[in-house]
Amino acid sequence: MHQLTLAEIARGLADKKFSSEELTKVLLARIAQLDPQLNSFISLTGELALQQAQAADARRAKGETGALLGAPIAHKDLFCTQGIRTSCGSKMLDNFKAPYDATVVAKLAAAGAVTLGKTNMDEFAMGSANESSYYGAVKNPWNLEHVPGGSSGGSAAAVAARLLPAATATDTGGSIRQPAAFTNLTGLKPTYGRVSRWGMIAYASSLDQGGPLARTAEDCAILLQGMAGFDANDSTSIDEPVPDYSASLNGSLQGLRIGVPKEYFSEGLDPRIAELIHNSVKELQKLGAVVKEISLPNMQHAIPAYYVIAPAEASSNLSRFDGVRFGYRCEDPKDLTDLYKRSRGEGFGAEVQRRIMVGAYALSAGYYDAYYLKAQKIRRLVKNDFMAAFNEVDIILGPTTPNPAWKLGAKNSDPVAAYLEDVYTITANLAGLPGLSMPAGFVDGLPVGVQLLAPYFQEGRLLNVAHQYQLHTDWHTRTPTGF
């Protein structure tokens, strides 16, 4: 049962081949057996899961249907879940139990999804390796000595290891797509504003976006259908109709215009990954797509702009964690200043402290114009490049990451080296565009992803291209040894 995709589970439940309760028990046992190797979960919610599974079975017995009704999932541990620890992978929130459900959690629960637990993540979603978590590093099921990518590495590792069929995740600079590439999954970052951020603990508010991680584009379509939609509680949520993503999966790719940016194939890209990307282009050409070279001239400025904007927003968002209202509080503070200093110094890890300091500096008097304002101007140039490109092509294709997953600890002494791994993904967040990563092959036994980008609200087009590609390739069906 653990090998079933979301779509196969929906068909199995509809045909009464098994019940949601039976499936949930199988997966909870599998998590208990295998997750100690991976550390992909922070909290398990077995009792809640069985209650939800029984309720889903009762709804089906009354004739109700739905692709997510009785389907087991997990939530990245920054989506607030009522009465359950929501830690953001941080000591700061280790004792925090959310008093309400995030909109994403509530929508999926209403659709009948069964929550197995909360997945591990880089602390406050800051990282590309899932090594900054207070609860320890997550390991890549393809090679336990390597990182699974971050910050949604717990969700990615759990799905890749077949502990569950799909999970929610978030993407601020590539944190859905990069772990998807590193663990042989399909991961989708929707258009900014497509999925509500209400109840999703913020890292960088103008960049964060929730989305699905699953093994196939078909499964991502099912999970996104349950997550997407306007939310009056979120001022950045966009009131745009949500199409039937599954209905568009089987459209022809005949005449689809694919742009391949020349800037993507620079000296920083592993040549073996470049070859796999070119192979995926050839596969799509066989399906009728037309390929042309394009240019994104301001891509070279994206990383410095992102690493000013994101920390600036983080320094503002994380100022609320002060040891007074909720979260971690230091022992026996001498005075208010000591309370603030020690609560934040002890509660936040090194990477979070580093980004808060960078952000506070960029926003400080005398440096705002030189750094933050200039970064926002670059952000507009990046967006303009994409708008010009989409006048010529329907989607943009390239590598998701410049290298395969690195060894645990390999980049800990050089944070900038880890930041550079986001070079292909952060531009979509700066521009607010939807992006998808899908499996494209292996290098040294480690998975490689190909990234697709589309105009605003064209998630259906991305899912259609990925689904057609997956009908004619088998990379996404490969399973890590031992899982």
Image (tube, rainbow, N blue to C red):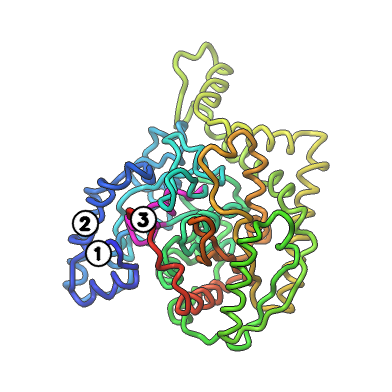
**Structural distance between the alpha carbons of marks 1 and 2:** 8 Å
Q: Which quadrant of the structure image shows residue 58?
A: bottom left
Q: Position of residue 131 (x, y in %)?
A: 50, 39
Label 3 vs 2, first from the N-terminus:
2
Three-letter amino acid code at the position of disc 3? Thr
221 lies above or below 27 = below
**Structural distance between the alpha carbons of marks 3 and 2:** 19 Å
Q: Which residue is mark 3?
A: 481
Q: Quadrant of the C terminus?
A: bottom left
Please tell me whether mark 3 sits on a helix, a strand or a loop: loop
Name which residue lies at 52% across and 75% down. 460
Q: Which residue is mark 2?
A: 26
123 lies above or below 405 = above
Please tell me whether mark 2 sits on a helix, a strand or a loop: helix
Q: Quadrant of the N terminus?
A: bottom left
Q: Residues within 10 Å of mark 3 (few under 14, many from 20)?
A: few
Name which residue lies at 38% across and 52% down. 158
Describe residue 20's horizontal placement relative to residue 406 as left or right.
Answer: left
Residue toward you, 9 or 451: 451
Is 164 magenta? The answer is yes
